[in-house]
Image (tube, rainbow, N blue to C red):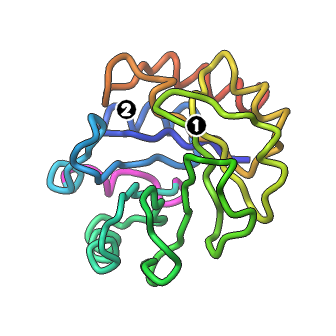
Amino acid sequence: MFVKICGITNRDDAMAAIKAGAGAIGFVFHKPSPRYASPEALRAWIRDVPREIWKVGVFVNEAPAAIEELRGDLGLDVAQLHGNETPEQHPREIRLWKAFRGVMEAPREYPAEAVLLDGPGSGQTFEWSIAREFAGPVIVAGGLTPENVRAAVEATNPWGVDTATGVESSPGRKDHAKIERFIKAALGK
């Protein structure tokens, strides 16, 4: 199982997540988000991220060509799609994770490397037992904190877990001590 720290906007937070044991870090490329990471700002340091750490771009209804351009420009490993994208609208030149907020209505099989199950709203959990109904790798997200992530892992046996708000000091800024506690709890250390 891997841990993804999402909503990374700066180098210090990225390096703290990596040092604490994150296997993936996420960058939100949706401008309305308070966790938006501008490609221009990332260019200054994203190449400092070790190759073995997955760099995940989070997109909402973005054109496949734009996603593929950012993949090449920033060295992204995975596109995580959070909009209304259909399989016909997926980028082809990058690994793909598809996120679903309405997990009750989400298809139990989907043509992506993994599905990410998110809570109904920012910082909200969902009924974790639902994750066991999905075929293929599942990433559990939504409302996960250092205090509840171990219970989520035990309830779902996921391929990965993902948090953004659960380890923040303010939107777009991470609390490094919370990151460390989250990763230790997720990995059962």
Number of marks in the image?
A: 2
Q: Position of residue 157 (x, y in %)?
A: 83, 43
Give the residue furthest to the left. Answer: 40
Q: Left or right? Give the position of 49 relative to 121.
A: left
Residue on which the image places disc 1: 119
62 lies above or below 167 = below
* Quadrant of the image occupied by residue 34: top left
Give amino acid for label 1: Gly
Mark-to-mark CA distance, 1 and 2: 23 Å
* Quadrant of the image occupied by residue 64: bottom left
Residue sitting at x 66%, y 49%: 139
Mark 1 Cα within 10 Å, few/some/many (few <14, many 20+)? many
Residue sitting at x 66%, y 70%: 110
- Highlighted range, magenta: 44-53
Dot 1 or dot 2: first in sequence order is 2
- Is residue 49 within the magenta segment? yes
Q: Position of residue 15 (x, y in %)?
A: 41, 37
- Is residue 27 within the magenta segment? no
Give amino acid for label 2: Asp
Foreground of the two, 145 or 20? 145
Residue on which the image places disc 2: 13
116 lies above or below 10 = below
